[in-house]
Image: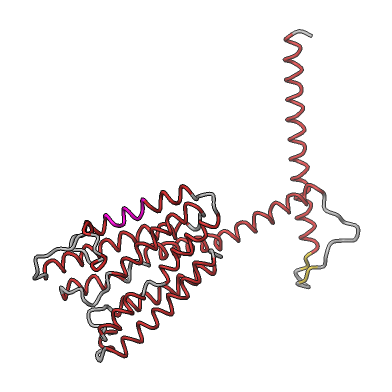
Amino acid sequence: MCVGEREACVCVREACACVRLRVCVCVCVRERERERELAAVVFSPEVGDLLGPPAGYRRSPAVRASDEIMEVEADLHGSQPMESSVGVLSVVASCVMVFGGALPYLPQYQEILRSNDTTGFSTRVCLVLLLANILRIFFWVGKQFELPLLLQSVVMISTMFCMLRLCCHVHNSNRVSTKQHRLSELDPRYFWQWTMFEDYLLFCLLFSVGCCLLTLLLLDSPLFIEALGGLALLLEALLGLPQLLQNLQQRSTRGMSVKMVVMWTLGDVFKTSYFLLNESPVQFWVCGSVQIVMDALILLQVFLYAPDAHSKFG
């Protein structure tokens, strides 16, 4: 067969295919029109009820397929608004998880600026949160969990450094003695009571390097990874303990922002609910439950030690 004859055969086959396609489309259109006419006959306006199809009538396969496609499209269009609403709520909840943990420290930051005094706030709260969130980041390296929880750790570390920087500035401005306490002295009596903010940064850097080396060596050990996550969340669960002990030692809550503790409580309740609904690892919601208990004890101290507790809540 020559080239011209082959091209002619190809053209004939394409023409036949187009004709068959047009015939199928015409058949589907005629079947659809026949269905509409039958539906108009079956429905009686006088009676106002659906009488049903005549005996022995069956829809053609083309019409059934068309009806099924229309039903699927209707279901998809109906479910889209609900899915979009769920998506918006999920994004809002994730944003609250990322930034909500840092918001309670805004009232305490303002209180320290207003009073120019840091005695009511325990900087060991910053120590606990820094260690817990650094460990949580390395826990994520070995066992990936929700990304908002990882971002929350980054935001919390930045917030704690801001609090420490402010405390160091206020403490140095009010300091009478010229003696300074530095990390390089390695004096355990003044641990986390250093004069310069750079010492806190250096300590956290050294701690992070040590955790990084240990994680790289034991990354294939599931026991180590679970222990790392458990330790991180145990420290976070004890977040309120330094503040609780300082209030107990001073027999006062003066200088501590009650709004901060109230926001702690609300945030911990929300956080624990988020962990349970998202089926996060068990360490997370156990940590949240312990934090709620700590928050309740600190609020109890407010009523026991502060005669002006009601005005502080206002």
If the image is split into quadrants, where does the C terminus sit? bottom left
x and y percentages locating residue 154 in the rendered image: 36, 57
Extreme residue toward the right, this view: 56
**Which residue corresponds to the image point at 22% horizontal and 56% vertical from the top-left?**
184
**Which residue corresponds to the image point at 40% horizontal and 79% vertical from the top-left?**
294
Residue 300 colored magenta? no
Provide the major secondary structure of the magenta segment: helix
Q: Which residues are magenta?
A: 202-209
User: Which quadrant would residue 42 be assigned to in this image?
Assistant: bottom right
Asked if residue 299 lies left or right of residue 289, the reply is: left
Q: From what the image shows, is residue 308 above or below residue 127?
A: below
Q: From what the image shows, is residue 189 above or below residue 139?
A: below
If the image is split into quadrants, where does the N terminus sit? top right
In this view of the protein, which residue sits in the foreground, 294 or 108? Answer: 294
x and y percentages locating residue 277 in the rendered image: 54, 68
Asked if residue 134 lies left or right of residue 165, the reply is: right
x and y percentages locating residue 308 in the rendered image: 24, 90
